[in-house]
Amino acid sequence: MSSEPTLQIPPRWVSTPSTTPRVDLLLAADWLPASGFRPRAMVAHDPTAASLAEFQSQLISTYLAALGEADLEEAEIYPCPAREMSYLRLWHRNDGYDLMTEARTWLVDGVAWTIAATVEHTDYPDFADLFDELLLRFPDDE
């Protein structure tokens, strides 16, 4: 059985395949909120022998290095019914926007699957529930 996840794409979001290695799917809202920043998300996978906590530490380092001036607001590992989930929330700036990125990661059969979503911080209240529902589902989830 495949351990690749599925994702229900939210209404009014569009998806495109990615050409970047280990980035499987790119998502974006098909409208611009008041801030002018188009909310976006991506699904990525990384083969790993690391534990979820070790992978989370690596992911934090990767995000902080890639985003430049970024603040890690939250880093937790939550128990979930089928498997643990790593959760990260970072604040960063890009092109004059104050952004917030949430990343959720699950470790399945030696592969870390991550979905990361980014929104302008003033738009976050309008997208918080959607981000909470933007979860990967795996074949053995109940």
Image (spheres, rainbow, N blue to C red):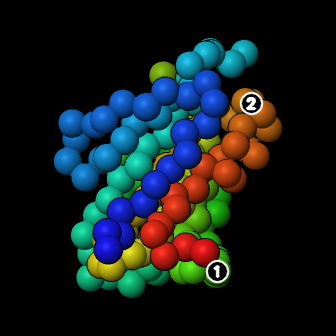
Q: Return the residue found at the far front.
A: 1
Under circle 2, the secondary element is helix
> Given the image, on which type of amino acid does mark 2 rest?
Thr
Quadrant of the drawing holding the N terminus:
bottom left
Task: Identify which residue is drawn at 61% across, 37% down.
Answer: 10
Instruction: Say the numbered circle drawn on residue 3.
Output: none
> Label 2: how many residues lie within 10 Å, few (<14), some (14-19) or many (20+)?
some
In the image, residue 65 sits, relative to residue 56, either above or below, namely above
The mark tally for this picture is 2
Quadrant of the drawing holding the C terminus:
bottom right
> Label 1: how many residues lie within 10 Å, few (<14), some (14-19) or many (20+)?
few
In the image, residue 20 sits, relative to residue 137, either above or below, namely above
Task: Identify which residue is drawn at 39% across, 76% down.
Answer: 108
> Given the image, on which type of amino acid does mark 1 rest?
Pro
Instruction: Say the numbered circle drawn on residue 81.
Output: 1
Q: Where is residue 136 in the image (x, y as percent from the top left)?
A: 51, 58
- Mark yes or no: residue 2 visible: yes
Decide if residue 14 is on the left or right side of residue 55: right
Q: Where is residue 46 in the image (x, y as percent from the top left)?
A: 28, 64
Q: Return the residue found at the far right.
A: 125
**Relative depth, front residue between 135 and 140:** 140
Decide if residue 23 is on the left or right side of residue 31: left
Task: Identify which residue is drawn at 55% across, 73% down.
Answer: 141
Q: Give how far apart the Cα atoms at labels 1 and 2 are.
A: 32 Å
In the image, residue 107 sits, relative to residue 30, either above or below, namely below
> Which callout, 1 or 2, points to the residue nearer the camera?
1
Q: Position of residue 33 (x, y in %)?
A: 68, 19
Under circle 1, the secondary element is loop
Residue labelled with disc 2:
122
- Mark yes or no: residue 97 visible: no
Q: Which label's residue is closer to the chain start, 1 or 2? A: 1
